Image (cartoon, helix red, strand yellow):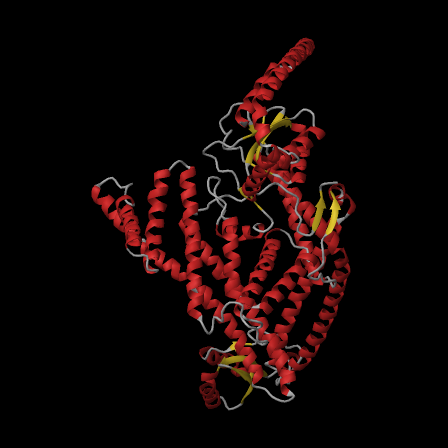
């Protein structure tokens, strides 16, 4: 463990250089002595082994001759037939089959990497781990929190600066993407760089200058946008006063006239008019405009009445206009429109600059991945611990990758100690699934539910055949299957897909094959647009037979799930539990099915025996007798769950019928047209209708097929809860880095 390594490193560092020199001298002496002794031992061993080999060979040759003579005489013909077959062929074949079966449905074995090295090699080693992309680092802070002589790396400033660079490059990318006229298509593939090219990106691309230009343009555009918004708002406000044909400058020339321009509530308009006209003879009041509940007005009066009129207006909630009226509203609006046009021209210039900068989008994408990779590497430093001169890391690595990593470390570094250890019993290392080429895409189905824990069985290869069959029965159309196969095959060949997305596309391609098969069995081709004789049955005419077949398949599915549960219990040494919790249900369910098929008394005995075992053992973990009894009753009540589970498989019929009948209805709709119209409307309805049915049907089929796995199948044996393996790796959002060169 890393703790032991750390303690040893601290002790070694305290001993000093003198101890190192003594150790070197002693090592040379031991090496010399050991070499001499080894050569002597080898010579003696060779001599003894040769003598023993000769004597033993002679002895066994004599014995073999005596013992084999009768056998050879009696089996000459058989020996002739087998003499050209290698004697270990059968054993090797059996071992090979077993190995392939195990390897095709396994959770990849994990090892713990413990590594100690000089501090000055820290960044290079992390770079190597990131390049190999096969180690998930373990946070050691908690483990070494109270260990004397151990410290932690404080890289806050460096990480903060790198994260700031990441935010800047992210901004530059998102900004330029808006103005990039070169749009990437579905089939555009990412650029591939060597590791050396990737490491030199920052020195080759002046991304900071591009960022500052982007920032400047964005600030100018925002300023322009805000200014324009104010202008537009003013234009709208002046528009409400467009009927006012005087301005402040003109009214100010009237020395003996007071004027009031503003807004009053519509409900006070008549009352205000009446009050002012009754009290003042020389007064002028005009309504300029009306908007919702307000009225824009202008009032002219003698200067002597100014204060009195102002007091009256205040009582009616009069609000003076806040706009500048040094010119008439119409002229103000003309000037505002000119300013808005000038701002639009200015914005277009900025956008033109941004479009020119967008030619650097590809370079920015590369730097984006480079800096994100750098951020992840610097974040990883917080997982390490250090002594005065060394640093220590721990991480998870798959067993198949440890030799490759060991070789890479030995080739690049000299003063590095590392070891690989098995996880201890109470540890839960991250999970990597490894399946054969058929089952691999269906790992997505498993991971969407939950990854298995290290002690569980990977259910992926078990669910694969059922997923294919169920999907095919629910989709069941030759035409739809052919379309799915062509589209997914083309996508896999032409599109740059990887990870779970590639697995999903491959899964749909695999599922298209049973879709075609069951389409042939049911006689379905684009909803029956071309009549095809079913190889098995027409589900519309004889749905009950398909229903029976669906439930029968469902029972097989449930039995397999129970079988996996029994396997897990036996593997953990709980053989009796396997019999009580699984064997009893096999007896009850098999007996009940046998009775339904007319099995007679033997079937009844089998079912009753299974029920009795469940009743007596389902509550065995409870302490009291009452608890055991009611636990058994509740366990036996679980038979209703199995009935519900079995009936759930009726959806294999229901969705198959639904998809086929929807397609059939579109074909029927086409048949309602006649004459030239059918040649126009027909293809449109066919393409639109069947595309819709294919999309909705495929999605629904996937969801319901997954549901049968998650509830009915996984519910019998699977818990999940494994952690995803997340190795330190190079970001490849926009580019690929070839680390094999």
Query: Which quadrant would residue 572 be assigned to in this image?
Result: top left
Residue 94 image point, x, y percent:
56, 38
Q: Is residue 681 above or below residue 227?
A: below
Q: Is residue 65 above or below residue 342?
A: above
The residue drawn where x is 64% and y is 27% is: 117
Residue nearest the viewer, comparing 332 with 339: 339
Residue nearest the viewer, comparing 180 with 597: 597
Residue 369 image point, x, y percent:
68, 48
| Count of numbered tags | 0
Where the C terminus falls, by quadrant?
top right
Residue nearest the viewer, comparing 314 with 198: 198
Query: Which quadrant would residue 557 be assigned to in this image?
Result: bottom left
Q: Is residue 73 above or below residue 500?
A: above
- Position of residue 580 in the picture relative to residue 440 (left or right): left
Residue nearest the viewer, comparing 393 with 388: 393
Q: Can see residue 625?
A: yes
Q: Is residue 246 above or below residue 525?
A: below
Q: Can see residue 155?
A: no
- Position of residue 51 in the picture relative to residue 468 (left or right): right
The residue drawn where x is 76% and y is 65% is: 349
Residue 320 image point, x, y percent:
54, 76
Residue 532 image point, x, y percent:
57, 73
**Residue found at the very far left of the displayed protein:** 626
């Amino acid at each position: 463990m890393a703790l032991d390594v750390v303690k040893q490193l601290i002790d070694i560092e305290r001993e000093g250089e003198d101890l190192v020199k003594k150790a070197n001298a002693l090592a040379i002496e031991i090496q010399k002595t050991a070499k001499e002794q080894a050569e002597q031992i080898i010579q003696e061993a060779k001599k003894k082994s040769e003598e023993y080999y000769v004597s033993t060979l002679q002895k066994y040759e004599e014995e073999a001759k005596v013992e084999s003579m009768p056998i050879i005489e009696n089996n000459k013909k058989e020996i002739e037939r087998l003499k050209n077959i290698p004697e270990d062929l059968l054993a090797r074949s059996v071992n090979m089959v077993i190995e392939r079966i195990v390897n095709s449905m396994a959770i990849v074995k994990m090892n713990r990497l413990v590594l100690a090295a000089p501090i000055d090699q820290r960044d290079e080693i992390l770079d190597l781990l990131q390049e190999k992309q096969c180690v998930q680092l373990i946070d050691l802070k908690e483990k070494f929190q109270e260990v004397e002589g151990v410290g932690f790396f404080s890289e806050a400033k460096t990480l903060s600066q790198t994260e700031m660079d990441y935010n800047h490059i992210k901004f530059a990318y998102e900004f330029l993407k808006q103005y990039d006229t070169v749009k990437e298509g579905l089939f555009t593939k990412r650029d591939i760089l060597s590791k050396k090219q990737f490491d030199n990106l920052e020195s080759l691309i002046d991304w900071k200058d591009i960022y500052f230009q982007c920032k400047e343009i964005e600030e100018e555009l925002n300023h322009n946008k805000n200014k324009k918004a104010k202008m537009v708002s003013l234009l709208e406000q002046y528009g409400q006063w467009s009927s006012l044909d005087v301005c402040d400058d003109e009214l100010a020339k009237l020395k003996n006239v007071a004027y009031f321009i503003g807004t009053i509530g519509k409900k006070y308009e008549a009352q205000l008019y009446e009050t002012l006209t009754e009290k003042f003879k020389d007064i002028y009041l005009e309504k300029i405009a009306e908007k919702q509940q307000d009225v824009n007005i202008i009032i002219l009066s003698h200067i002597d009445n100014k204060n009195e009129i102002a007091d009256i207006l205040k009582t009616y909630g009069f609000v003076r206009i806040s706009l500048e009226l040094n010119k008439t509203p119409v002229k103000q609006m003309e000037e505002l429109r000119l300013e808005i046009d000038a701002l639009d021209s200015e914005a277009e210039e900025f956008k033109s600059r941004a479009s020119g900068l967008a030619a650097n989008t590809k370079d920015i994408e590369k730097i984006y991945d480079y800096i994100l990779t750098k951020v992840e590497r610097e974040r990883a430093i917080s997982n390490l611990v250090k002594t005065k001169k060394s640093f220590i890391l721990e991480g998870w690595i798959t067993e198949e990758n440890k030799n490759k990593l060991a070789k890479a470390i030995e080739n690049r570094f000299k003063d590095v100690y590392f070891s690989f250890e098995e996880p201890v019993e109470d540890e839960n290392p991250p999970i990597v699934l490894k399946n054969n080429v058929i089952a691999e895409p269906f790992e997505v189905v498993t991971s969407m539910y939950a990854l298995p824990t290290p002690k569980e069985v990977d259910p992926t290869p078990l669910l694969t055949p059922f997923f294919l069959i169920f999907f095919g029965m629910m989709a069941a159309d030759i035409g739809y299957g052919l379309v799915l196969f062509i589209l997914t095959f083309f996508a896999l060949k032409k599109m740059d897909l990887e990870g779970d997305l590639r697995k999903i596309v491959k899964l749909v391609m695999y599922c298209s094959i049973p879709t075609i098969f069951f389409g042939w069995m049911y006689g379905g081709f684009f909803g029956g647009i071309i009549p095809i004789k079913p190889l098995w049955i027409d589900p519309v005419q004889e749905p009950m037979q398909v229903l029976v077949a669906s439930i029968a398949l469902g029972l097989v599915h449930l039995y397999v799930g129970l079988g996996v549960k029994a396997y897990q219990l036996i593997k953990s040494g709980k053989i009796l539990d396997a019999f009580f919790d699984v064997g009893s249900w096999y007896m009850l369910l098999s007996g009940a099915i046998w009775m339904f098929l007319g099995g007679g008394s033997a079937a009844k005995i089998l079912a009753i025996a299974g029920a009795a075992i469940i009743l007596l053992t389902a509550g065995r973990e409870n302490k009291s007798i009452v608890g055991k009894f009611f636990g058994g009753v509740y366990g036996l009540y679980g038979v209703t769950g199995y009935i519900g589970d079995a009936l759930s498989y009726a959806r294999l019929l229901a969705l198959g019928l639904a998809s086929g009948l929807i397609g059939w209805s579109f074909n029927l709709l086409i048949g309602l047209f006649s004459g030239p119209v059918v040649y126009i409307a027909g293809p449109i309805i066919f393409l639109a209708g069947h595309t819709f049915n294919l999309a909705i049907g495929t999605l629904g089929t996937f969801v319901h097929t997954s549901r049968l796995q998650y509830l009915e199948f996984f519910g019998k044996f699977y818990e999940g809860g494994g952690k995803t393996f997340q190795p330190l790796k190079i970001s490849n959002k926009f580019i690929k880095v070839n680390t094999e060169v």
